[in-house]
Image (cartoon, grey):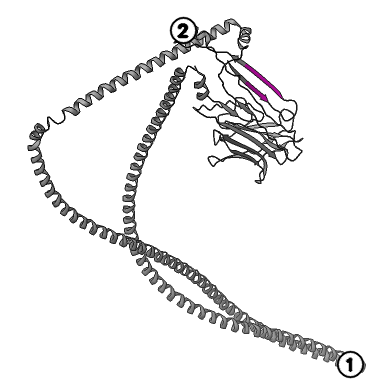
Amino acid sequence: MTEVTRTKRTLVSEGPVETTTTRKTTTYSSSGGYEGDDLSSLYKSSMSPRTTVITRSAYGSAPRGGSGYNMERSVSYGYNYGAAPAGAYSSVVGVGVNQVKGNRAQEKKDMQDLNERLAGYIEKVRFLEAQNRKLASELEQLKTKWGKATADIKAMYQKELDEARKLLDNSEKEKAALQIKVSTLEQSIEELRQKYAEALQLHESDKETIDRQNQQLSDYEAELGLLRRRVGSLEDDKARDKKEIKRLTDALNKARIDLDNETLNHIDAENRRQTLEEELEFLKAIHEQECKELACLAYRDPTQENREFWKNEMAQCLREIQEAYDEKVNSIRGEMETFYNLKVSEFKTGSAKQGMEAQHSKEESKRLRSTTQELRARVADLEIRNAQLEKELELLRREYEEKQREWEIEGNELKSELVKLRAEMEGMLKELQDIMDIKLSLELEIAAYRKLLEGEENRHGLKQVVEQWITTGQEQSSIDYDTDMKVSQVVKGEMSAKTTYQRSAKGPVSISECSPDGKYVALENTGKKDEPLDGWFIKRYLEDTKKEIKFTFPKGAVISSRPGQKAIKVWARGSRPAGSDDFEMQDNNTFGVGANIKTTLHNVNGEEKATHQQRTLYTS
C-alpha cells in the first residue's frame, strides 16, 4: 500500500492561511512465480503510508519603513515494506474486494514480467559462462601445440631474419649519415637563428630610428609651422607698414598741398592787406580833404564862437576816427601775424615728424625684407629635408605593412589551427560525456538487477529493492507561490534541500516575490501614495556562478498605491504573458536560477531600498 500526499499552500501577508491536502492511497499485492497461487496467497505486502510534515512560520506586516519574514516548508517522502498487522486485511476488504483483486492481478503480472526478464538474464549469464569455458579449452589446446612448430618456423624465417639484419646494418649506416646531416642542419639552424636575432635587433633599431625620425619630423614640422607663422606675421607687419607709409605719404602730400594753399592764402592776404592799406590811405586822404573843406567852411563863419565850436568838434571827431582806425589796423595786424606764425610752426613740426617716420619705415622695411629672404631660404632647406624624411618614412611604412601582413597571415593560420583543435577537443569531451552517461546507466541497471537477484534468492520480494533503490526527500519553503516537487533518486542514502527566503525594505516599495525559474521579479507598494520608479534598477546576483543581472526602469515608471494595482512584475525577455502591461527586460531571457541568489532594488542615487535573499542548504 502506497500513500501519496500532495500539499498546496497559499500564504498571504495578512489574513488566514488556507491549506488543501489531497491524499491518494493505493494498495499493491503480488505473488512470486515459482510456487504458484498458494505461495502468492501467503505473501504479505506492507507499505507504511508516506508522512507529510509541514512546518511554517509567518510574521505579520512589518512596521512602515521596513518589512521581513522567514518561511520554511519540509516535505519528506519514504516507502516502507514489511509485514502488515493482523487486522490489515479487514481494512482492505473495507476498501473493496474488486480493487484488491485488480491490484493483485496487476502485481502478479508485474512479477511475471520481472521473472521473465530475470530468466532471460540468467540464461544469458549461463550462455556467457559456457562460452568462457569453450574459450578456456581452446586456449589450453593452443598452449599444448606451441612447442612443435617452432623449428619449422625458425627455418622458414631465418632467411628473412638475415635480410632483416642486413637492412638493419644499412639502416644504421644511413642513420649515421643522417645524424651527420642533422648536425650540419642544426648548425645551419643555429646560424639562421643568430641571423634572425640580428635581424630582430636591426628591426628594433629601425623601429627606434623611425620613432626618432618621426619625432624629428614632428619637431621640424612644428618649427616649420612656427616659421611660417612668423613669416605670415612679418608679411602682415610688412603690409601694415606699407599701409602706414602710404598713409604718411598721402598725409605728406596733403600737407604739401595745404602748405601751397596756405602760401597762396598768405600771398592773397598780403595783397588784401596792401589793398586795404592803400584804400585806407586813400580814405585818409579823402578824410583829410573833407576835414580841410570843413575847416575852411568853419573859418568862413562870421562868428568867432561858431568857428571855435566847429574847430573843437572837428578835432574831437578826427581823434576818435584816428583812434578807431589805429585800433582796427593793430588788431588785424596781430591776428594775421599770429595765424601765419602758427601755420608756419605747424608745417615745420609736421614736416620733421613725417621725415622721421618715413626714415624709420624705410629702415624697418629693409630689415623685414632681409629677414623674409633668410626665412624663405631656411623654409626651402626645411622643405627639402622634409621631403627626404617623408621618403624614408614611406619606405619604413611599406616595410612595416609587409611585416604586419606576414604576421597577420601567421596569426590567422594559428587561429584556424586553434579553432580546429578546440572543435576536436569539444568532440572528445562530448564523446567522453556520452561514455560516462552510458557507464553510469549500466552501473545503475547492474546494481538494480543485482538487488533483484538477491531479493529473489532471499524470497523477500520487492522490499529490499524498493527500500534501497528509491528514497525521495524534499524540504523547501515558498513565499506567495507554489513550487514544483524536487525528487532525488539514489541507490543508497538520502539527500534533502532546505531553502530559506528573507526579504527587507527601506520604504514602502519592497520585493514581494522572485520566480524560482528566473522568469520574473515582483514588486509591491505598501504605502498610501504612488511611488515613482524613474531611474530605479533591480540587481540580481547569482552567488554560485558569480553572475550579475541588472534591469533599469524606464522614464515615467510608477508603482500605484490603488487596491489591486499595488504589485507589478518585471518579466524576462519572452516570458511576459500576452496582453500584460508589466515591464519586460530586453537584455536577458532569464533573471537566473541557482541555490544562493541575492536580489536588490536601488533608487536613482544607487541606495539600496529593498532586498530579497535566497539560501539553499543541502544535507545528506
Indicate whether 441 appears above or below 591: above
In the rendered image, residue 7 lying in the magenta stretch gets the answer yes
Please give the residue where the numbered disc 1 appears in the rendered image. Answer: 307
Disc 2 residue crowd, few under 14, some 14–19, many 20+, Cα 10 Å: few
Q: Secondary structure at mark 1?
A: helix
Rendered residue at 51%/73% (across/down): 241
Asked if residue 165 shows in the view, the reply is yes
Q: Amino acid at mark 2?
A: Gly
Q: Which residues are magenta?
A: 6-23
In the rendered image, residue 334 lying in the magenta stretch gets the answer no
The front one of 335 and 268 is 335
Quarter location, residue 146: top left
Quarter location, residue 604: top right
Q: Secondary structure at mark 2?
A: helix
**Residue 362 horizontal side relative to residue 430, left or right:** right
Please give the residue where the numbered disc 2 appears in the rendered image. Answer: 36
Asked if residue 300 shows in the view, the reply is no
Q: Residue 54 placed where, x, y %?
A: 66, 26
Residue 235 — which label?
A: none
Q: Earlier in the sequence, mark 2 or mark 1?
A: 2
Rendered residue at 9%/33% (across/down): 151
Of circles 2 and 1, which is in front?
Answer: 2
Query: Which quarter of the image is occupied by the C terminus?
Result: top right
